[in-house]
Amino acid sequence: MSSHLAGALVVFAVLQIGVVARLGGSLLMHLGIFFAIGGFAMAARGLEARWVAFAASAQPRDTLNRLFREDRAILWIASIGAPFLWVPVAMICRTLFG
């Protein structure tokens, strides 16, 4: 899971920066990137701790495989999809502040 978390964090950060840059983001949006990446990193630490606990448990192998596939899918969907949440934020900011 560690390799997936590291890769997902890099993809998340690059997409965050790319989407905000493409939208012509304000200083506030650039500051938001900082907090979004920090939040993602903290969530990744929690997921890593979960898998460390799973490794020490006596869970059946097929259960662990299923949980791994589920967690991996959620991780990658979130890391690729979440940066695009800046699009509605930018639209709202442009509507409110011109």
Image (cartoon, rainbow, N blue to C red):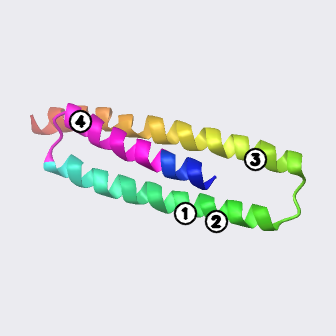
Q: Which mark is residue 54?
A: none
Q: Quadrant of residue 90?
A: top left
Q: Tell whether label 3 touches label 2 (CB within 8 Å).
A: no
Q: Residue at label 2?
A: 49
Amino acid on which disc 1 is placed: Arg
Q: Of helix, strand and loop, which one carries label 3?
A: helix
Label located before the other in sequence (4 or 1): 1
Label located before the other in sequence (2 or 3): 2
Q: Tell whether label 2 touches label 4 (CB within 8 Å).
A: no
Label located before the other in sequence (1 or 3): 1
Q: Is residue 13 above or below residue 39?
A: above
Q: Residue at label 1?
A: 45
Q: Quadrant of residue 97?
A: top left
Q: Residue at label 3?
A: 67
Q: Of helix, strand and loop, which one carries label 1?
A: helix
Q: Tell whether label 2 touches label 1 (CB within 8 Å).
A: yes
Distance from the alpha carbon under mark 2 to that under mark 3:
14 Å
Distance from the alpha carbon under mark 4 to that under mark 3:
35 Å
Amino acid on which disc 3 is placed: Leu
State the image coordinates of residue 30 (x, y, percent, origin top left). Answer: 22, 49
Q: Residue at label 4?
A: 90
Q: Which residues are magenta?
A: 8-26
Foreground residue among 23 and 11: 11
Label located before the other in sequence (4 or 3): 3
Distance from the alpha carbon under mark 1 to that under mark 3:
17 Å
> Is label 4 or label 1 in front?
1
Q: Residues within 10 Å of mark 2 (few under 14, many from 20)?
A: few
Amino acid on which disc 4 is placed: Ala
Foreground residue among 86 and 72: 72
Q: Of helix, strand and loop, which one carries label 2?
A: helix
Q: Tell whether label 3 touches label 1 (CB within 8 Å).
A: no
